[in-house]
Image (cartoon, helix red, strand yellow):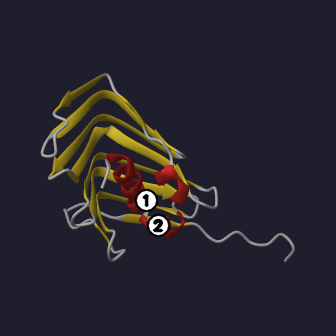
Amino acid sequence: MSMRRSIPILIAALLAADLADARRGDRDQPMDLRADRQSGGLGDDDATVFSGNVEIDQGSLSIRAERATVERRAGDIARIVLEGSPVRMDQRTDRGEPVNATAARIVYTPTDEIILLSGGAQVMQPRGTLSAETIRYNMTTGSVDAGGDGGRVRTVIQPRPRDSGS
């Protein structure tokens, strides 16, 4: 899986409450990655570290972090680690609704299809928010496991808008 395709999949998974509606066309757009520094190898079994004011944009997807590490094994992405104070991710759904996620650290492991947000993790969208110290999302099963780390989980579900004609 190329890095260009991995990051949007990561973002789609982070938006677990709205996964089916994550902007599908974003992953087919060019990825623009900017940072103050890039270091590491470009081989099939290397890691590349982007550090300092990391900005990743692809379609409606926007990621801001202090550090992004992309680890490859046998040419495939083995793990992506985003770190920041916090990492900020913004994306629009296919319906045009904003979805925002923040956490101190986000780890995506494509072989397991697992996303782990830790350190004040929060996913926000117009229909509600999910906050916890840790949020784990399984892309294969669609299950979300939040908390379990001694902290509290908070979910806020917004009421459905009423028709003005009623």
Residue tagged 2: 19
Judge by depth and name the residue closer to the eye, 49 or 31: 31
Question: What residue is drawn where x is 47% and y is 42%?
Answer: 30
Which x, y percent locates residue 26?
51, 51
Q: Is residue 99 visible?
A: no
Of the residues under marks 1 and 2, which one precedes in the sequence? 1
Q: Is residue 166 visible?
A: yes
**Residue toward you, 44 or 4:** 44
In the image, residue 40 sits, relative to residue 18, either above or below, namely above
Give how far across and how far down residue 117 sits, in percent.
29, 55
Question: For the point 14% across and 53% down, which residue is it?
Answer: 74
Quadrant of the drawing holding the N terminus? bottom left
Query: With 159 as the anchor, is 44 left or right in this view?
Result: left
**Quarter containing the C terminus:** bottom right
Q: In the current view of this chain or complex, which residue is farthest to the right? A: 165
Tell me the distance, in whole angstroms, between the alpha carbons under discs 1 and 2: 6 Å
Task: Classify 14 as above or below 59.
Answer: below
The mark found on residue 12 in the picture is 1
- Tell me the amino acid under the disc marked 2: Leu
Which residue lies most toward the top here? 36
Residue at (54, 65) in percent of width and height:
21
* Residue 101 on image: x %, y %: 42, 51
Could you tell me residue 102's position as x and y percent?
38, 47
Amino acid type at mark 1? Ala
Q: At 38% from the left edge and 52% from the top edge, which residue is drawn? A: 5
Picture quadrant of residue 9: bottom left
Packing grade of label 1 (10 A; few <14, some 14-19, many >=20) is many
Q: Secondary structure at mark 2?
A: helix
